Image (cartoon, helix red, strand yellow):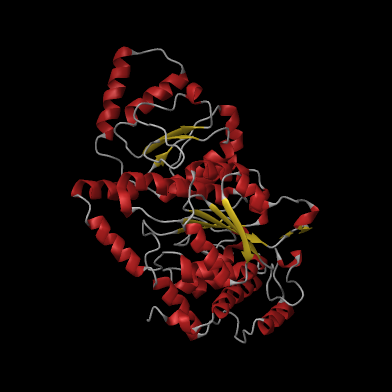
C-alpha cells in the first residue's frame, strides 16, 4: 500500500469516517457519546495522519508518540482511529460490539483491553494528569539513554477535564518542569450535559494555561491545516502547549449539532440519516469506502520507517546499555535485587533496631534505590517528614531531568495520576509519598492503578 494514499482522499472525508463509525456504533449499542467523536474528528484526523509518529502494526513500540483521550466518554473516537489505522485486534466486529459485555471497545477506553489504548480514562481530569507523568517519564528516560527516547505525548481534553480540580495540579506540574513535549488539544465545544458551559464556568483557559507556564493558542478545530500548523509550532516550544480547538459538538447532525442533546445519547435513525446527508456520506452503517480505508491504513503505516530507524539507533547502543534499556522497558527487575533484599533482611533480624515507620520506609528505599535504577521517589511536599529522598535519588528540576526524585508540591491528586503515567510509559517504577489522611485525595488514581495493574505505589 502506498504511504501517499491518504493524499488522494480529502482530509474531511477521512474525518467523516470517524464520525460515521461513532454514530453507527453508539446507535447500535443504544448507548454512548456521539457528540465528541463527531466534533473532534478533524483534530484526531490531523494528529494521526499528519503529526503523530506511530506504527499501527506495532502499537507498543517504546518510542511511539502517546495519545491520551482524556475525555474518555468519547471513546468511539479512539476506537475508530485504532480500527481505521489498522491496529491489530480492533476489527470492524469490535466496533459493532461497542459497549457490549466482553468487547474490547468499552464505554470508556480501558488499558489492556484494546491495543493502542495508553491508559484507562474514566474520571474526567485523570487522563491529562496521567499524561503529565508520561511526558515526565519520556524526559527522564531520555536524560539517561539519549536519542533512543525522543517522542511526544498528545492529549485530547474536554471542558470537563479542565473543570476538574486535578487538571490545575497537572498543568502546574507540567508548566513548572517545562515538559515541552506535552501538547494538549482542548476540544473547546462549549457544551456539557447541563447545556452551555457558560451556565457554570467563565474561565479563560488560554490565560489559565499561560499563567501556569504553558504556551497557548486557539484555532478552528475543524480546520485540519490550522491544527497541524499549531502543533508544528508547539513542537518548537520550550514549554508545554495548549491548543484550544474551537469545535461544534455533534458536527454534522442536523438538529443536535452544537447542543448538549448530542453529548450522551444515540442520535436516532432520523438524525443519523440527516447527518449522512449533511456530511456527504451516502454509505451503509459501518461501511467505509475502500479508498478512504486505504488512506487511513497508509496513515497507520506512516511511522514504520521511523520505527525501523529507531531500532537501528537502539542496536547501535553499547551492548550493556542496550540490555539495560530493554530490561527497563520490559519491566524486568534487576538481577541484584533479591540478594540486596536478603542481605538487608538478615541485617534487620540480627540487629532488631527500633525505628519509626517513616524511618523504616527510608531504610527500605536506601536498600532498594542503589540496586533498582528505575525506582523513582518523590513526595507531595513533606519530603523531610516522609523521608523518601535518599542519596541514590537526586532531584530533578525544571528542564533538567537526570535525577530520580520529584518534588510534586502540595498536589496529591496530580502526583498520584502522574505516577500512573510514569508506570504506563515504561522504564520506571515510580513511587510517591504523602500522609495517610491525604491519600483520600489520591483515591481516583489509586483505583485506576488497581484497574490497570500499573506499578506505581503510594
Q: Position of residue 454 (x, y in %)?
A: 45, 46
Instruction: Answer whether residue 9 is visible to the viewer in this image.
Output: yes
Left-right relation of 193 to 2:
right
Residue 253 or 22: which is nearer the viewer? 253
Q: Position of residue 352 (x, y in %)?
A: 35, 13
Q: Is residue 49 above or below residue 317?
A: below
Residue 324 or 356: which is nearer the viewer? 324
Question: Residue placed at 43% from the left, 82% from the top?
Answer: 5
Question: Residue placed at 38% from the left, 31% from the top?
Answer: 394
Instruction: Answer whether residue 71 is visible to the viewer in this image.
Output: no
Q: Position of residue 250 (x, y in %)?
A: 69, 70
Left-right relation of 276 to 1:
right
Q: How many marks?
A: 0
Q: Position of residue 440 (x, y in %)?
A: 61, 34
Residue 391 or 344: which is nearer the viewer? 391
Place residue 194 in its image quadrant.
bottom right
Question: Residue placed at 42% from the left, 50% from the top?
Answer: 425
Residue farthest along the bottom direction in this orientation? 282
Residue farthest along the left direction in this orientation? 319
* Image quadrant where one finds the N terminus: bottom left
Residue 152 or 361: which is nearer the viewer? 152
Amino acid at each position: 500500500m502506498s504511504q501517499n494514499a491518504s493524499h488522494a482522499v480529502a482530509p474531511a472525508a477521512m474525518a467523516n469516517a470517524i464520525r460515521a463509525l461513532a454514530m453507527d456504533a453508539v446507535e447500535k449499542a443504544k448507548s454512548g457519546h456521539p457528540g465528541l467523536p463527531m466534533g473532534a474528528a478533524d483534530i484526531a484526523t490531523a494528529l494521526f495522519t499528519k503529526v503523530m509518529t506511530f506504527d499501527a502494526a506495532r502499537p507498543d513500540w517504546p518510542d511511539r508518540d502517546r495519545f491520551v483521550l482524556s475525555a474518555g466518554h468519547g471513546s468511539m473516537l479512539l476506537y475508530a482511529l485504532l480500527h481505521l489505522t489498522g491496529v491489530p485486534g480492533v476489527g470492524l466486529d469490535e466496533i459493532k460490539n461497542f459497549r457490549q459485555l466482553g468487547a474490547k471497545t468499552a464505554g470508556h477506553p480501558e488499558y489492556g483491553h484494546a491495543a493502542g489504548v495508553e491508559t484507562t480514562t474514566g474520571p474526567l481530569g485523570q487522563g491529562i494528569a496521567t499524561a503529565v507523568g508520561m511526558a515526565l517519564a519520556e524526559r527522564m528516560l531520555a536524560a539517561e539513554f539519549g536519542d533512543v527516547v525522543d517522542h511526544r505525548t498528545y492529549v485530547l481534553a474536554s471542558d470537563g477535564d479542565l473543570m476538574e480540580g486535578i487538571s490545575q495540579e497537572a498543568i502546574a506540574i507540567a508548566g513548572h518542569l517545562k515538559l515541552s513535549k506535552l501538547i494538549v488539544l482542548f476540544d473547546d465545544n462549549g457544551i456539557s450535559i447541563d447545556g452551555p458551559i457558560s451556565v457554570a464556568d467563565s474561565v479563560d483557559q488560554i490565560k489559565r494555561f499561560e499563567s501556569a507556564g504553558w504556551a497557548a493558542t486557539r484555532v478552528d478545530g475543524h480546520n485540519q491545516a490550522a491544527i497541524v500548523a499549531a502543533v508544528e509550532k508547539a513542537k518548537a516550544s520550550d514549554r508545554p502547549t495548549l491548543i484550544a480547538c474551537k469545535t461544534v459538538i455533534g458536527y454534522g447532525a442536523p438538529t443536535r449539532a452544537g447542543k448538549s442533546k448530542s453529548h450522551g445519547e444515540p442520535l436516532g435513525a432520523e438524525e443519523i440519516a440527516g447527518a449522512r446527508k449533511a456530511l456527504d456520506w451516502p454509505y451503509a452503517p459501518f461501511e467505509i469506502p475502500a479508498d478512504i480505508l486505504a488512506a487511513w491504513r497508509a496513515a497507520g503505516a506512516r511511522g514504520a520507517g521511523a520505527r525501523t530507524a529507531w531500532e537501528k539507533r537502539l542496536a547501535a547502543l553499547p551492548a550493556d546499555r542496550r540490555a539495560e534499556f530493554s530490561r527497563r522497558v520490559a519491566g524486568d527487575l534487576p538481577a541484584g535485587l533479591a540478594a540486596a533484599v536478603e542481605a538487608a533482611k538478615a541485617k534487620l533480624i540480627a540487629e532488631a533496631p527500633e525505628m519509626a515507620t517513616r524511618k523504616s520506609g527510608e531504610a527500605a528505599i536506601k536498600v532498594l534505590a542503589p540496586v533498582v535504577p528505575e525506582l523513582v521517589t518523590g513526595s507531595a511536599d513533606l519530603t523531610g517528614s516522609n523521608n523518601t529522598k535518599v542519596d541514590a535519588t537526586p532531584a530533578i528540576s525544571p528542564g533538567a531531568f537526570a535525577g530520580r526524585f520529584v518534588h510534586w508540591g502540595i498536589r496529591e491528586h496530580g502526583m498520584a495520576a502522574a505516577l500512573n503515567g510514569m508506570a504506563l510509559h515504561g522504564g520506571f517504577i515510580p513511587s510517591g509519598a504523602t500522609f495517610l489522611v491525604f491519600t483520600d485525595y489520591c483515591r481516583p488514581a489509586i483505583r485506576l492503578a488497581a484497574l490497570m495493574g500499573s506499578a506505581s505505589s503510594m
